[in-house]
Each structure stands twice: as C-alpha cells, then as structure tokens.
Amino acid sequence: MSTISIHRSELLRITHNRSRIFRQRFRRTIPPWRMTMMNLRSSDTSKKEELSVKISKTIPQVDQIRLEDLRFDRVQPPDVEFVEEDRLEFGKFVAREAMLDEEYWTAAWLRAESHWEDRANERYVDNFKRKFADQEFNAIKRRCKGLQGQKCSCIVAVKKEERHIKRSVIKSVVGTLDLSIRFFLQGETFPGEKVKSQLFCSINRQGSNRYGYIANVCVAKSARRQGIACNMLSFAIESARLSGVEQVYVHVHRNNSIAQELYQKTGFKIVETGQSDDTYLLMYTR
C-alpha cells in the first residue's frame, strides 16, 4: 500500500526551549489576468455608484408625510385666497385645484370609499380602505410634483364658503378627479392606439402632440346628484385648454352605464372600443 503525504497550507511548530509558536504560511499568488478582472469590476462598481448618486440628485423626491403630520381639524381656506379664473362656482360648491396636504388626503380617502363601496360588509374593509388611501395620497403627491414626467393636478370640489360657518377640510371636500397633460407616442393619434411597431419608439414632445387625460373621478355618496362630477369635468376640460391642449380623453368601464351617461352628457364620445380590455376610450368633442 502506498502512502500519500499531505502538505497543509499552515504549519505549526512548537519549540520547548523558547515556548514560542512559529507559523509558516504559504502565500497564495494571484495571476495577473485575475488582478486585471478584479480591478475592472471595482471600477465598474464605482462608476455605477457615481451614476446612481447623480441620478438621485437630478430626480426630485417627495417626503413621505405621516398621518400624524396632517391636521384633520384644519379649517378650509377662504375663497378670497383663490383667483376667480382658477375656480368654478356652481350651486353650493366650488371646483378648483387642491392646495393643502389635507385636501390631497381627503381626495385619496374619497377614492378609497368609492373603490370599496360595493364591498362595505367585507372583513377588515376599514383597514383595506386606510391602506389604499395612504398609498393613493403619496401617489397623488408624486404625480402633482411631476415625478412621473408629466404635468398632473388634483381637482377637488369643496363646499362654498358661507357666512359664520367654518368647515374643516375633511368635511368640505366632496369630490375629486385627476387631470394630467401627456404626450402622444410616435405614430399615435389617440392614447393606446396600436401602431406599427418600430425599432425605436419615442415620445413626440411637441406642443401640438399633447393631450389631457382625466382619471379617478368620484363624488362623496352624501353629495351625489348635485352636478358635482359634471362641473368638475367641465373645470378640468377648461384647465386643459388653458394649458394649450385641445383633446381630452377618459376611460370608462363597459358595464358602468352611469359613468358613460355622465361623460356623454358632458360632451365625450367613444373613439375606441378597447378590445384588449373591458373599457371604452372617450374623447371630448365640443
């Protein structure tokens, strides 16, 4: 039987006279090509870190606002603080762009109420609505600050100011919608149009290729059938036109006959059936 001698990478030798431990290490040599690869990787990592720092500096950030920072007893600002052209009065209400964080959050809560309206008896529905409202609140803030590359505004309908009556923000906001100014993709004549695929698809950012898009229309259940949604749509359309936009679009579900009737009454007509999903695309034609 042959014997095999095993050499360890680290040897220990103890001398009884001096009681010392001598360690003998065999240094591992790294090939030059491997050193080159390691240097390239480290340089790539440093470049990526520098690029990420530059990108983070150029992209504006939105501070996450906690519910504890909001004042739900805050009094609704008086009408004199708004320019007459920046609002639309109708009946007992006023349509205008939201200003306060409390108005943004109330708009988000109205959307949560509308989203879960048909499932009010489900278990933990209040927790779901609260989570939905918190997420939508921060999403509204991001959109309105232009963090998604487009101009967006949150429009609200509030109760008109009355003499000797002061209302909190949360009790004053009764309706909301989003208006965004977007750009057509190259080759599009309406949003989402199926165009011939190209190797490189770009966004045509010329002024004539912009359009308005309305979304998240909802009204508090206690304030419906008072013309709030119709007047908010009219205010949004006029705001889009003041921004130099001629075409305004909105999507509606095929089974939502009430919303379809509202949009058609306001002046929208179907321009695309949306065969890939269950929605219609409508455009304002007046």
Image (tube, rainbow, N blue to C red):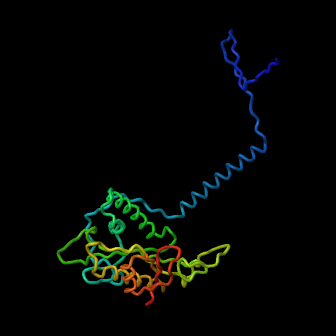
Percent across and percent down for residue 39 are 71, 47
Using the image as rendered, state which of residue 256 and residue 157 is in the foreground. Answer: 256
Q: Is residue 27 above or below residue 209?
A: above
Percent across and percent down for residue 109 are 33, 66
Quick check: 201 left or right of 180? Answer: right
Using the image as rendered, state which of residue 28 and residue 119 is in the foreground. Answer: 119
Q: Is residue 21 above or below residue 85?
A: above
Residue lying at 41% horizontally and 59% vertically, measured from the top left: 64
**Would you identify the image quadrant in which residue 196 lies?**
bottom right
Quadrant containing the N terminus is top right
Instruction: State the residue lying farthest toward the bottom.
Output: 286
Quadrant containing the C terminus is bottom left
Q: Is residue 6 above or below residue 35?
A: above
Number of numbered discs visible in the structure rendering = 0
Q: Is residue 225 visible?
A: yes
Q: Is residue 173 visible?
A: no
Residue lying at 75% horizontally and 47% vertically, measured from the top left: 36
Residue lying at 82% horizontally and 19% vertically, measured from the top left: 2
Quick check: 84 left or right of 60? Answer: left
Quick check: 140 left or right of 89? Answer: right
**Would you identify the image quadrant in which residue 56 lies?**
bottom right
Percent across and percent down for residue 157 are 31, 76
Percent across and percent down for residue 236 are 40, 81
Instruction: State the residue lying farthest toward the top.
Output: 17
Instruction: State the residue lying farthest toward the right.
Output: 2
